[in-house]
Image (cartoon, rainbow, N blue to C red):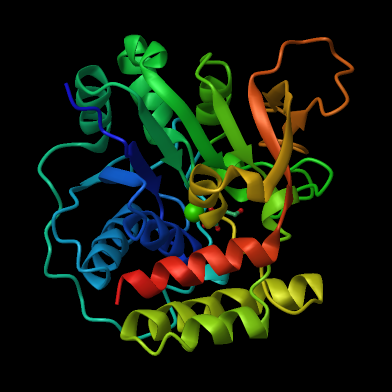
Amino acid sequence: MTTNPRKKIIIDTDPGQDDAVAILLALASPELEVLGLTTVAGNVPLALTSRNALMVCELAGRRDIPVYAGADRPLLKPLVTAEFVHGKTGLDGPTLPEPTLALADGHAVDFLIDTLMHEDRVTLCPLGPLTNIALALAREPRIAARIERIVLMGGGGFEGGNITPAAEFNIYVDPQAADLVFRSGVPITMAPLDVTHQALTTRARVAAIRALGTPLGEAVALWLEFFERFDEQKYGQEGGPLHDPCVIAWLLRPELFTGRDCHVAIETASPLTQGMTVIDWWGVTGKPANAHVLGGLDADGFYALITERLARLG
Ligand code: BDR
Ligand code: CA
């Protein structure tokens, strides 16, 4: 019997420039087998996140990756989007051709359930609101015991929120979905704003990506330059946080990160703090940990990894 040395992953995503870089990082990495992408409404509506996911696969020359469209709105709340960060397409920056690839037939939630019921040891990588993952867990609870791990970008601890003072965007958009996921018993690694705010797109780091001298390197540099402008102004610093690639980088190089196991609860009700991730960093509740929460990052190592992997895509 041969064993697959590659880690099987499904990326659930709402591209988003930072989602796009995360997808490229995964597609460029031989340690990972990307079984498919599932799209969700988040940064922009579902039709655009689906289009953008297809564009990214085409840019990477990976027409073999199936892309399934998923939920077009959160479980209970009306959709909140973030064009003010990502631009009206969600992937503003470079001018890229419209995708010629088509979406795979079927719904993302069916793909998630079918794949998880038939494949062992699949890791889920959610980079947007957790709607698809929650729907899959609710429809087929047996997948909870079969998921290897959920490695997600979302939430904030000491750093607070980015869409409200208390809440990070992905969790805020669908707090009911996040609550279901964090209560599911599936092992979770969480990359909150505390760690992603260390992954800054400084001039030198973007220049290194541009210096790859490839169309893909130029497209990524233009994405980052577009995407960082909002947060540079907001936080008054050089570069913006490159959130979502932290998920893939943790799978590839966990030693670039520090973190600890904590209990994490999601506020679903309060109008003031809805979507807040209440992280028991100091263990004051005595509740058992349900997530490995990342807190520290070797940012130079992180960008060296991204740049080296993007070079492989040509
Ligand atoms: C998260 O929200 C989106 O804008 C980004 O793509 C990232 O997933 C950061 O709060
Ligand atoms: Ca995202």
Q: Is residue 38 left or right of residue 281?
A: left
Q: Is residue 21 above or below residue 182?
A: below
Q: Is residue 12 left or right of residue 191?
A: left
The quarter of the displayed image where residue 284 is located: top right
The quarter of the displayed image where residue 201 is located: bottom right
- Residue at the front extreme, as displayed: 1
Q: In what quadrant of the picture does the C terminus appear? A: bottom left
Is any part of residue 268 visible from this angle?
no
Q: Nearer the viewer, residue 91 or 124?
A: 124
Q: In what quadrant of the picture does the N terminus appear? A: top left
Q: Position of residue 25 (x, y in %)?
A: 41, 60
Tag count in the figure?
A: 0
Is any part of residue 215 visible from this angle?
yes
Q: Is residue 15 left or right of residue 314?
A: right
Q: Position of residue 36 (x, y in %)?
A: 25, 44
Q: Nearer the viewer, residue 50 or 158?
A: 158
For the point 69% across and 62% down, the residue is 299
For the point 74% across and 78% down, the residue is 233
Q: Position of residue 173 (x, y in %)?
A: 55, 43
For the point 63% across and 62% down, the residue is 301
Q: Is residue 141 above or below residue 172?
A: above
Q: Nearer the viewer, residue 58 or 42?
A: 58
For the point 77% across and 43% down, the residue is 166
Q: Is residue 16 above or below residue 76?
A: below
